[in-house]
Structures are given as C-alpha cells and as structure tokens.
Amino acid sequence: MLRVAVMVSGGGTNLQAIIDAVQAGIITNTELVAVISNNKSAYALERAKQAGIEDVVVSPKDYENREQFNQALVEKVDSLNVDLIVLAGYLVVIPPAMIDKYVNRIINIHPSLIPSFCGTGFYGLKVHEAALERGVKVVGATVHFVDKGTDTGPIILQKAVCVENGDTPEVLQRRVMEQAEWILLPQAIDMIANGRVKVVDGKAVIA
C-alpha cells in the first residue's frame, strides 16, 4: 500500500481529484495519510478533514527563518512514513534536504506541456497568461518527478488541451484542470502505486 502525503497551498482542486479517485477505485493500492499546507486558511485542509485525512500546517510564518521551517517540514514528512509526496499546487520551495531524502518519490503537477511555460515565475494563472500572450494553439499539463531544478525532473505523463477562441486565462486554467490535471495526477499516482514507473538515465519509464 502506497502511503501518500499531498502538499498544497490553496483551494485543493487537484487534491479533491485525488481523493475522489481513491474513493472511486481509480487510484488503487494507495492510502492518503496526510495533507500538508503552508497556509492555515487553505481550503484544501477542509477537504482533508471532510475525507478523514490528517490535515497538517507547517508555515514559514511560524519560524524565525527559512532554515528552521525547512527542518520542521522535513521532520514532519519523515514522521508520516510516506512513500510518495504529491505537490498539488504547493507554492513553497521544497527544501533541498527533502529532495535528497526522497529521490524520485516527489511528484508535481504543472499546468503546461514542459518544457514550455515552466521554470521560475511560471505558476498558476501566470502560465495561462503567458500561453495566451504567445498565441499557442495547444497547452496542457505535465506530471513530473521533482529534482532540485524548477520543473526540470523526469516527466511521467503529459496531456494536451486545445486553446479556444475567446479564452481568458481563467477559462483556460479551468479547462486544463478539467481535461488534463485532474486526470493525469490520479493516473500517475496509481501507476507509481502499482510499480509501473521507474527512472532510468534521468527519464521516467512506464511499464
């Protein structure tokens, strides 16, 4: 049974997709053990409570400096004895010590087809604003393992979504969530839980 912690900063729509997929049997062999947020008022914590999942707040605001926060976060994650950490809209830089400790055991969902519109500064609506400004016809989402770069880890899954005439960043964001993110993230977790993903020579290979 894969023990999973989900880390999230905001509303938790991707978290809800994961919860629903576990309950529906789309994600198998998986237990959601905790939802961790840096934001005490994140609605994702309420989603966790409603699903009977432990809700945890580790906020940088509660520590004198980033080093203390990083240490507290790593200690909390270690205490949960998790096999996989899922970043689902988590807007805090993951401590390097955690990345070292959980190599190829942290995944992230990014709202573009990496390597387009990714890296430092590309998150949330900013990704969709940039895509529309550039005039691309196809966008999408990517699930990847996390390394010490920004959106540079091995790619697990990608799904394309068409841009439509009249799209606003908000409308496009919603379509990418519905048609790609909420499908890919549960799919990736299920594949990892059932031993279907491994990393070979820096690339994710799917069995």
Image (cartoon, rainbow, N blue to C red):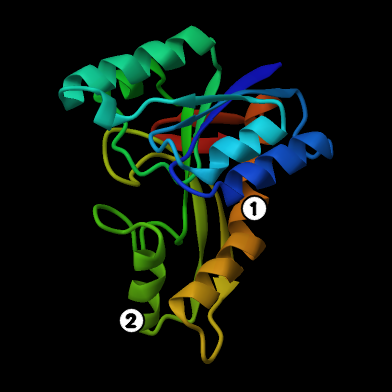
Q: Amino acid at mark 2?
A: Arg
The quarter holding residue 47 reads: top right
Specify the label residue 31 is tagged with: none
Image point (23%, 22%), residue name? 63
Q: x and y percent of residue 115 in the render?
A: 36, 58
Disc 1 is placed on an element classified as helix
Q: Is residue 37 left or right of residue 49?
A: left
For the question of whether residue 207 can be seen, the reply is no
Task: Tell me the quarter of the image containing the N terminus.
Answer: top right
Q: In this view of the protein, which residue sits in the foreground, 163 or 34?
A: 34
Q: Is residue 95 left or right of residue 40?
A: left
Q: Is residue 39 left or right of residue 96?
A: right
Q: x and y percent of residue 40 in the render?
A: 43, 35
Packing grade of label 2 (10 A; few <14, some 14-19, many >=20) is few
Image point (39%, 80%), residue name? 132
Q: Mark 1 and mark 2 in contact (Cβ < 8 Å)?
A: no
Q: x and y percent of residue 176 in the render?
A: 56, 65
Disc 1 designates what residue?
Answer: 182
Q: In this view of the protein, which residue sits in the foreground, 206 or 181?
A: 181
> In the image, is residue 63 above or below residue 179?
above
Who comes first in sequence, dot 2 or dot 1? 2
Disc 2 designates what residue?
Answer: 134
Q: Amino acid at mark 1?
A: Trp
